[in-house]
Amino acid sequence: MPLKFSLKLYARLAGLSALVVLLCMVLFVGINSVRSQFWHERVSEPLMRWLASSPAPEQQYHWLTPWHDFRVASAQELSLSPVTRERLGYGQVVAVENSLGYRFLVTGFHGETLQLGLSHPYRDIAVVSAQILRVHLDGTNPEERTKAAERLSGGLNVGVMWLEDPSALPGDEVLERVSSQGFAFYQDNGDGRVLVRLADGELVQLVMPAPFNPWAWPVILLLLLVSGSVLALVLILVLRDLDSNLRKVESVAVRIARGEMGARVEAGEGTVVSRLAAAFNGMAEHIQRLVNVQREMIHAVSHELRTPVARIRFGVQMIEDCQDQKALQKQLDGIDGDIQELDELIDEILTYARLEQGGPVFSLEETSVTDIVRQVVDEQQLVRPALSIESEIDEASERYAMADVEPRYIHRAIQNLVGNAGRYAAGKVLVRCHIDEDHCRIDVEDDGPGIPEDEWEKVFTAFARLDDSRTRTSGGYGLGLSIVRRILYWHNGQAFVSRSDSLGGARFSLVWPRKKPLEPGF
């Protein structure tokens, strides 16, 4: 995976994660602020309703004033907001958060406003409810305590249990506080409980409703739903972008199928399908080149075959008019030469087609390149005795002569260059061989007229020859150098032409890696 795309993907995932976390935090805080307000009002409502039901709560529960700022006053005296006054007018219990905790407000028996300030609402409501319970039960006959406890339990919305079994008692620390203060607040399995000792020594346990839970299952479900929705939306956008890019590839494939060989995918960099687009464009380039090569080959082959076939037809016609054996033999030799020319042309065409359309099955083996050079030089010297064909190999090249090559095709490439140089050389062809630890280089130079610089690239084009002659005197079919370049391509190398500094003619060079790469391109 490309580094640029990986970084973009990582940044997007990190941004998405941060967005989801931030959104969940905002929702969590916002929802729980509303839930907390509602919970505080609901959990305090029984106590506040109980206090409001008393005609004179300040006198009846006077002990609340010093500890919890219990007051009875008008809404104006308590500096209440219009919204709070309106809610009190509807008979609701209102919880107002302040720097000391909460103050709880309710409309009293005579229309006045009751205020109760609690620094720790859950614990303080439990303690106040327990104290009210103790006051009322202490003032009730033992025979009527059960009914009174039931009435208090329903009015204050708390559970009331008589502790008679010693095994149900809480720990010693709780009992010590009950002994010293008369009551003790503690938690059991998360629920608030208050143990109260009555005047006659009886122990009563008050059980509060469940405390506020910010991680209630509806909140978790909502957060999961929001997170899933955001992720689903992002996934839809990503898939839509991916589908759009794939549709571009599909569209170009359809255009190529219709014959628009120049169509290409424009996917840009850093996208999901950038590598696919690059591979597809590479394939399209290769297909277009093969189609062009095929067209050029068909055109050139039809032209190249026409001349020897015409000569053969002419020779056959001349045989009928031959009067002696010598003339007959001359025509037969000419026909044989034309057939040999056809055979060589077909071999060149097949070799070029095999290299151009995917390449042969290369079987690289460790072979001495210098031995191949010497073999080619010796063979070409025999074929062209009028020329001086020499090889120049230094000692360093002999030390690294063993290289990974396909001997038959490297032989063919060097042979094509030496043969081509021999056709245009005035009298000398020089083959230089330089091999080091990493690369092999073969330079074939001649003292011929050379090649104009603006034609250096053209000479490697199939069926291209700088002279327009297609006679036997010029030789060749314009495929030799194309074959050389393709052979070097399949060796991960290059073939190029320049001017010889020493001989003044053309210099053709072959350069390729001495050892095959870890991931060969063929």
Image (cartoon, rainbow, N blue to C red):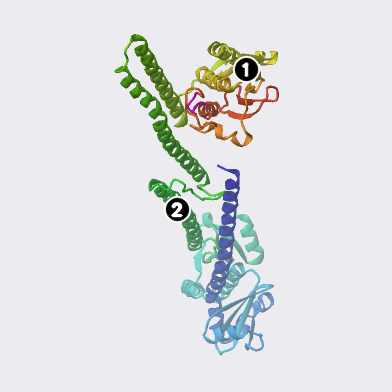
Q: Which residue was labeled with disc 1?
A: 427
Q: Nearer the viewer, residue 106 or 175?
A: 106
How far apart marks 2 and 1 lie (CA) works out to: 66 Å
Q: Are marks 2 and 1 in contact (CB under 8 Å)?
A: no
Residue 477 lies in the magenta stretch: yes
Residue 381 lies in the magenta stretch: no
Residue segment shown in magenta: 475-480
Q: Is residue 194 at least partly visible in the picture?
A: no
Residue 378 at x, y = what percent? 57, 11
Hey, which residue is sitting farthest front in the picture? 323
Q: Nearer the viewer, residue 222 or 162?
A: 222
Q: What kind of residue is marked 1?
A: Gly
Residue 36 at x, y = what percent? 56, 69
* Rendering quarter of residue 2: top right
Of circles 2 and 1, which is in front? 1
Total numbered circles: 2
